[in-house]
């Protein structure tokens, strides 16, 4: 009988922990004291979708890579908050490639158009968004091999 009592207490403890931890993962605090939601009904969308956002980055920000001294490659991860009005705020580099590349893309992302805001239960909410950018440079010898294979 004592064995069942201990099992019941352990079961209740585990269930309580699971429900408590899941119920508090819907929102994240922001540096300005407001709440930023991470679990929502409708996610924020860039005008034209992800394809349009990547095209805009390639056309307007990526050409600046050629003027930089750094030849670093890798994956850059930038997080930001899409506010209730669709504007983006609280930009932060989560994973860095090189400081000058990070700055180039941070400044570029700050100039992007307003997004369609995220919604939770039909109400506009600020939502945290992470944007991965892969930096890979084309090398001169790779250009030659590609052009030779096309001929």
Image (cartoon, grey):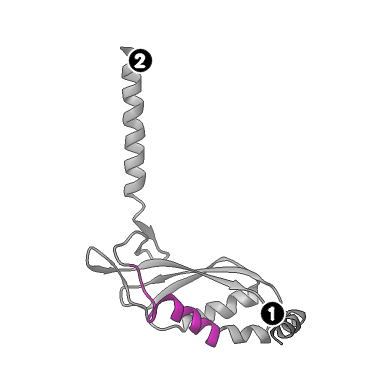
- Please give left or right for residue 121 compared with residue 67 in the image: left
At which x and y percent is residue 83? Answer: 35, 73
Left or right of 67 on screen, residue 89: left
Q: How many marks?
A: 2
- Quarter of the image with the C terminus is bottom right
Residue 58, relative to residue 84: is it above or below?
Answer: below
**Disc 2: which residue:** 3
Residue farthest toward the right in the current orientation of the protein: 141
- Which residue is tagged 1? 138
Image quarter of the N terminus: top left
Q: In this picture, is 113 found above or below 24?
A: below
Q: Is residue 65 magenta?
A: no
Q: Which mark is residue 125?
A: none
Q: Is residue 118 left or right of residue 70?
A: left
Quadrant of res 44: bottom left
- Dominant SS in magenta: helix
Pointer 2: residues within 10 angstroms few (<14), some, or many (20+)?
few
Q: Where is residue 131? Give x, y as percent.
A: 49, 70
User: Of marks 1 and 2, which one's residue comes earlier in the chain?
Assistant: 2
Residue at 69 percent of width and 73 percent of height: 72
- Residue 90 at x, y = what percent? 45, 71
Q: CA distance from mark 1 to mark 2?
A: 67 Å
Which circle, 1 or 2, is nearer the viewer? 1
Residue count near mark 1 (Cα–Cα under 10 Å), binned few <14, some 14–19, many ≥20 = few
Q: For the residue labelled by badge 1, is the local secondary structure a helix, a strand or a loop? A: loop
What span is colored magenta in the figure? Answer: 43-59
Q: Could you tell me which secondary element the residue under label 2 belongs to?
A: helix
**What is the quadrant of residue 129 in the picture?**
bottom left
Q: Position of residue 47 (x, y in %)?
A: 37, 81
């Amino acid at each position: 009988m004592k064995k069942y009592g201990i099992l019941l207490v352990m079961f209740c403890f585990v269930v309580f922990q699971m429900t408590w931890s899941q119920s508090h993962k819907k929102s994240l605090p922001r540096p300005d004291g407001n709440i930023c939601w991470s679990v929502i009904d409708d996610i924020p969308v860039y005008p034209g979708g992800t394809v349009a956002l990547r095209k805009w980055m390639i056309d307007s920000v990526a050409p600046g890579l050629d003027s930089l001294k750094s030849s670093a490659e890798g994956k850059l991860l930038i997080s930001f908050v899409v506010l209730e009005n669709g504007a983006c705020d609280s930009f932060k580099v989560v994973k860095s490639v090189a400081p000058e590349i990070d700055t180039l893309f941070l400044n570029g992302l700050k100039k992007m158009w307003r997004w369609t805001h995220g919604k939770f239960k039909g109400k506009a909410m600020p939502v945290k968004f992470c944007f991965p950018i892969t930096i890979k440079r084309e090398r001169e010898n790779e250009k030659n091999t590609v052009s030779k294979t096309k001929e």
